[in-house]
Structure formats: structure tokens, C-alpha cells
Image: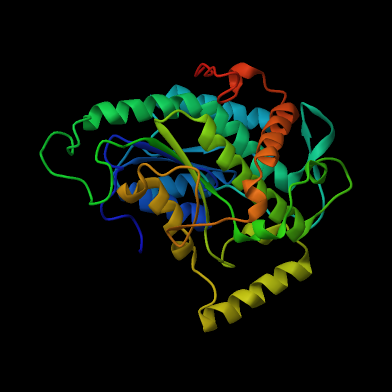
């Protein structure tokens, strides 16, 4: 697959949000989803880059929002702005990420010790944003079903959907970008907080395991009108992910990219955007939830990610670190949180 999905379930009138989309894989994903006709909400910290991308996307209505994912108040404000400005959200692509060379801590309202920055950006900000937008996603999923009709036909025009897909199934979607580096990590809540703990690739791998644990727990908690899946985007040294790593690690990553391009062992940013584009828009995965994908195929994640206790423990710890109450959390006590 290259670029946007040919038979996309996204189109004109739909709204998608791609975090970390001012450059690299996120920008390519935004371009792919805009090509379906959907309105794309671009997010990042680089305002000039974000506004330029919005200007370059086809059609009108796209928007850029700046938010620093190390600031949870900013994440909350970002979510609230999206809820105010758009009356629907068909897909949330959690793509934003960082890789820190040294262990740095971010203030969190429910943690006296602080949360490691890679975990804060890659997991905790994603956790907060997704929970904040969950009800809008759920309402949109119900709306999509009404728009398509429940009679097994494509919008009432008599054409059947792609063979093998349920034509009436058209939920909203949450796509979270993980990494196969999650396979190097083990569940360990202590690794996420305080001055002592992993940094560099170890912290990054832990944060990516957190993405998978989060996705599996989220998929169980969401209503049927929303799916949640995660993916490995491939290996793309051309992105700016490691810009905050050590000098030695950065040079090694660049060298790997040069050699990888010569041998075909690495992906371009466009190639790395293919799986999340597929998960966001393809009818082939309309009813699929709680899965890990690589190269547009559902594959088995690390065994550690299937630990139900670890999934619940991370969820509960994330709620605690963010000092959320039940009204702000998906599936808390069987009750859904209000949108605003």
C-alpha cells in the first residue's frame, strides 16, 4: 500500500486528528487522510510548520493547534478546543512522540516524584487526550452508523462494501503509534516516575509498551461505536524523533539511516505512515479492535502486553498521575464521562 487507502471509509465531512503531525510520519499521515476528503486537525509545537502543512493540504477546513505534550494543562486545553471547534471526530491518530537521551522529569498533578518525559509525552499525554475526546468519538461512531444505515448497504445506494467487511460496521477509530521496541520492555510502574530509572532507548521502549497496554485496556472500555488499535510504523531514521537524544546516539541513528537506505532495511516517512493510514481509513479493519499491527497486518505483540493485571495497573496509575476523577475516564464504574 502506498499513500491513502483507495477504498477509504473516511471522506468529505469527516474529521480526523493526527497528533505530532507537523513533520515526519505524522505529516505524511495527515497528507494521506486529507487525500480522502476528510478535514484534518494538525497538531504539534512548531506553529510555522503546522500552518504551512495546513495550507498545503487539499481542500479547506483543516486546522492547526499548538500544544506541548509535556504540559498536561496544555493537553487538556487542546482537547477542549477541538471539542469546541468540531462537532464530530471520526478518528484520533495518536502519533506524537519523543526520544530523550537523558532522564528528565515532567510535573504531573498526581505524582510527587514527577513522570519521566518520554513516558509523559508518548503515553500519558496520549492517555489524557484520548480520554478527553472519547465521548465525542463515541457519539461520532453512532452518527456514522446512522449516516450509513444499518441495512448492510453502502449509504442506501445499493452497493456492497469490500468483501469480508461488515458493511454496517463503521465505528470511529483510535489509532496509537507504538513501536516494535516495546518488545524489549517489561511492565514496571516504578520505571515511569522519579529520578531513578531508564533513559534513552530503554525509556522509549517502556513508553511504547505502555502504548500497547493502554490500547488493549482502552479497547475493552470503549463502547462498540469506537475501535482502538495500535501499530509499529516501521523504522524511519529520517524523522526527528531522536533529536533530543545524545549526540552519539543521534550520529549512530543517522549512520544507520544511510546504510539502511542503501540496503533497504529502513522506511521513508511516507512508507512508515502506511499502517496508521490503513488503520484510520480502511474498510478492512472497520470492526477490528484491540489489535497490534505491523505492515498493515494484525500480528502478536510482546507477551508482556497481554498481561491483564499490567494493563489495569497502568491505566489506574495513569489516572492517579493525572489526578483524574471518574467523570473524566473511559469506562469508569460503567459510566461514560460527559463531553465538556
Compared to residue 83, the image places residue 100 above or below, namely below
How far across and down, in percent of the image, does residue 209 sit?
66, 50
Residue at (83, 42) in percent of width and height? 190
Camera-side residue of 198 and 49: 198
Compared to residue 39, the image places residue 331 above or below, namely above
Q: Can residue 245 be seen here?
A: yes
Residue farthest along the left direction in this orientation: 158
Q: Can residue 57 be seen here?
A: no
In the image, is 49 to the left or to the right of 248?
left
How far across and down, in percent of the image, does residue 81 sit?
51, 26
Count of numbered circles in the view: 0
In the image, is 248 to the left or to the right of 283?
right
Compared to residue 334, the image places residue 268 above or below, namely below
Tell me the quadrant of the picture where the N terminus can be found. Answer: bottom left
How far across and down, in percent of the image, does residue 331 sit?
56, 24
Residue at (30, 47) in percent of width and height? 283
How far across and down, in percent of the image, does residue 272 sit?
48, 62
Amino acid at each position: 500500500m502506498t499513500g491513502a487507502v483507495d477504498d477509504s471509509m473516511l471522506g468529505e465531512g469527516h474529521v480526523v486528528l493526527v497528533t505530532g503531525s507537523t513533520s515526519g510520519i505524522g505529516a505524511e499521515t495527515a497528507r494521506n487522510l486529507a487525500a480522502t476528503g476528510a478535514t484534518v486537525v494538525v497538531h504539534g509545537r512548531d506553529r510555522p510548520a503546522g500552518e504551512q502543512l495546513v495550507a498545503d493540504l487539499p481542500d479547506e477546513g483543516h486546522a492547526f493547534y499548538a500544544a506541548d505534550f509535556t504540559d498536561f494543562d496544555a493537553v487538556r486545553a487542546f482537547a477542549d478546543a477541538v471539542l469546541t471547534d468540531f462537532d464530530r471526530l471520526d478518528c484520533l491518530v495518536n502519533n506524537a512522540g519523543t526520544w530523550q537521551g537523558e532522564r528528565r522529569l515532567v510535573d504531573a498533578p498526581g505524582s510527587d516524584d514527577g513522570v519521566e518525559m518520554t513516558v509523559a509525552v508518548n503515553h500519558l499525554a496520549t492517555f489524557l487526550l484520548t480520554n478527553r475526546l472519547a465521548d465525542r468519538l463515541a457519539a461520532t461512531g453512532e452518527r456514522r452508523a446512522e449516516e450509513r444505515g444499518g441495512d448492510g448497504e453502502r449509504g442506501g445506494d445499493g452497493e456492497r462494501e469490500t468483501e469480508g467487511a461488515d458493511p454496517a460496521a463503521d465505528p470511529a477509530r483510535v489509532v496509537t503509534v507504538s513501536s516494535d521496541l516495546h518488545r524489549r520492555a517489561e511492565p514496571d510502574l516504578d520505571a515511569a516516575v522519579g529520578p531513578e530509572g531508564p533513559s534513552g532507548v530503554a525509556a522509549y521502549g517502556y513508553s511504547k509498551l505502555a502504548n500497547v497496554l493502554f490500547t488493549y485496556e482502552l479497547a475493552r472500555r470503549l463502547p462498540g461505536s469506537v475501535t482502538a488499535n495500535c501499530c509499529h510504523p516501521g523504522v524511519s531514521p529520517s524523522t526527528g524523533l531522536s533529536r533530543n537524544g545524545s549526540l552519539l546516539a543521534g550520529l549512530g541513528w543517522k549512520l544507520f539511516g544511510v546504510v539502511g537506505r542503501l540496503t533497504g532495511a529502513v522506511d521513508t516517512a511516507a512508507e512508515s505512515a502506511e499502517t496508521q493510514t490503513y488503520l484510520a481509513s480502511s474498510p478492512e479493519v472497520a470492526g477490528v479492535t484491540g489489535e497490534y499491527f505491523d505492515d498493515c497486518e494484525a500480528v502478536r505483540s510482546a507477551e508482556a502486553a497481554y498481561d491483564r493485571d499490567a494493563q489495569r495497573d497502568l491505566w489506574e496509575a495513569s489516572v492517579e498521575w493525572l489526578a483524574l476523577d471518574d467523570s473524566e475516564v473511559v469506562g469508569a464504574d460503567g459510566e461514560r464521562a460527559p463531553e465538556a
